[in-house]
Amino acid sequence: MKKILAVIKREYIQIVRTKGFIIGTILGPVFMLALIVVPIIVSSASVEKQETIGVVDLTNEIFMELDDKLDHKDYRLKDGFRRYVLEKFEPSPGVEEVRNELREKVLRKEISAYIYIPEDVLEIGPAESAAKDSVPEEVKAEYVSEHTTDFEELRTLNRALNNVVIEKRLKREGLDPLKVAQYIKRVDLQPIKITKKGEEKDTAGTFMISYFLALIIYMAILIYGQVIMRGVIEEKSSRVVEVVLSSLKPFQLMMGKILGIGAVGLTQFSIWTLFGIGASVYSTSFIPAGADFAMPSIPAHVFIYFVVFFILGYFLFGTLYAAIGSLVNSEKEAQQLVMPVTMFLIVPIMLMIFIIRAPDSSLSVFLSMIPFFTPILMFLRITVLLPPFGQIGASIVILILTILLMVWLVAKIYRVGILMYGKRPKFAEIVRWIRYR
Amino acid sequence: MKERVGYLPEDRGLYPKMKVGELLLFLAEIKGLKSSEARKEIDFWLERFDLSDWKSKKVEELSRGMQQKLQFIVTVIHQPELIILDEPFSGLDPVNTKLLKDIMLEMKEKGRTIVFSTHRMEQVEMICDNICLINKAERVLEGNLSQIKKQYGKNTVVLDYDGEANFIKNFPEIEKIDDYGKFMEIRLKEKSSPQDLLPKLVGKISINKYEVKEPTLNAIFIEKVGGKEVKDEEDTSSH
């Protein structure tokens, strides 16, 4: 045991002291934050500038009001100037001629686009047809430009045009658009999550947090598993292992390595957790009051299960990665063998959406009982809809038994593989190693 | 058991990224040394091998020879009773070779058993008590070195000379010759006497040394294994 401790200490100190660990620990949260914040900043600080848009209005009624609408402050640039300046083009001598002329203007960049409004946009079908087809056929106006993928701009213009057209139609029928807006006000179906402790207004938070935490388990197992594997390969190729094994048993070396690197992982999580708590304390004083975003809290039991499933998952996959490391001579060689192990991690990730939607279906229960899937899927189920404790307990017991079996098997493979150089052993040979006494 | 054995592999077996002091401490600890005890030993051995200045350098920064010395420290730091050395002198300059050899003899004095594996027969001759020649995983020759040499009798001549000595090959009393150009090991036939050979050489070449002795281990080895491919041989020096 003292020897395992020495190995754990060595692994831990050697990794924690590397620049990679320090940078990774600091940059990890920064990176995650950046992943969330940067797109928001980029999209809000988008390349907005004033544009001139031509309008061919065959109804001859819409242009004025559309121009008014776009003059409203909602449609203006941040500095108060108009975002869209409209320029009216009369359809004379003929529609085609004007459209040709406008096409030229767009190509010459005199205007950035033109909108073509056909005559029939304001018309409504006869009442009978409206009753028969519950969805009336759409009328189409056209937005003609060289660049038609700025969907933000398209949506803005579309909304403005729509509002104008609908108001026009309503007025024609003698209806008050403001009143109609009240009539057709939407209802929002609000999800409320019930837990034993009471009710909690559920924004997209639970979903996001579940997904996020499960992904962290996945990433951590993947990353630290590879660290184990690389360590084993390094010891093997630098032949340190010969010296080390003249002092301790292969099993002690393997366990020490897995435990030491696991401790590194827990250290990193602890730092991140502290960072997270600090950030949330700081940011609650920061989020403007009345913002429609409740910082979803992570319940204590979820946090505990997170740690439990990370540790168990790490052990299960850590032994596999150690076995792979002992079988190969170089990292390149290892890649082929890593694939099937990685698949065991990727499959549950692909199943996540299904589990989140149907956390207590019998298929979900079954899948979360498969030990290689348990760390991610059972944890996910716990975050979404706390399963009966019997299920959680059963999955943990199965997982632990599997881990013990794997440790036993891998120790036998590792013991022989670690001192075996040259050609990679065939499967039959590995089976024979397991049978060695 | 493992605490009583020290092993020096042929290839360097050190963690390249670790600092010298930490590496020694780790490897001493897994041999069961207490860390206070280990620290004392580490300082002693680093001093002895003139590596004290390198204690906080990374192993990969050390030269091959220095790494070899470090590897040796790893092997003996826990004062093992059985020391296994696989080509311990490779990569060492003459000064360090002498230092290492002295320490090996010191260990022998203290009653430690050293298993010394090498391809260099002259090293074996100078150091070992008992030998075991291994060729293609089979024991070819085993026993006390001086007794083995006695068996081969005193009909070998070692000649240190200058000049053209090719003509010696044609003498009838010659069994076998191993010529190095300025140095020659001559094995005589059973009935011939070294005393008869010397006069035939005088005047023809300039003789710096003419010594009658037992055959060298090198010659014995070549004779034993013959022209067959040599694989490995191992020699034991024990107390």
Image (tube, rainbow, N blue to C red):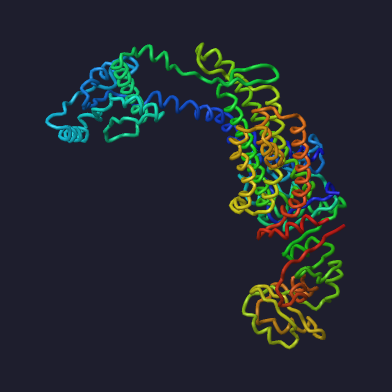
Across and down, in percent, residue B230 comes to 71, 71
Above-or-below relation of A286 to A35: above
Task: State left or right for residue A320 relative to residue A26.
Answer: right
Question: From this viewpoint, which residue is outermost toward the bottom?
Answer: B172
Across and down, in percent, residue A149 comes to 34, 34
Q: Quadrant of residue A358?
A: top right
Q: How many marks?
A: 0
Task: State left or right for residue B191 relative to residue A179.
Answer: right
Q: Nearer the viewer, residue A79 or A142?
A: A142
Across and down, in percent, residue A100 comes to 17, 36
Which of the image's four quarters has the C terminus of chain B? bottom right
Q: Is residue B95 visible?
A: no
Question: From this viewpoint, which residue is outermost toward the left?
Answer: A93
Question: From this viewpoint, which residue is outermost toward the front?
Answer: A128
Q: Nearer the viewer, residue A425 or A165?
A: A165
Task: State left or right for residue A23 relative to residue B67.
Answer: left
Above-or-below relation of B93 to A392: below
Q: Nearer the viewer, residue A15 or A146?
A: A146
Q: State the residue at coordinates (71%, 87%).
A: B171
Q: Quadrant of residue A14?
A: top right
Task: State left or right for residue A359 relative to residue B75.
Answer: left
Q: Is residue B188 visible?
A: yes
Q: Quadrant of residue B173?
A: bottom right
Q: Nearer the viewer, residue A382 or A413?
A: A382
Across and down, in percent, residue A83 comes to 29, 21
Q: State the residue at coordinates (11%, 31%).
A: A93
Above-or-below relation of B161 to A38: below
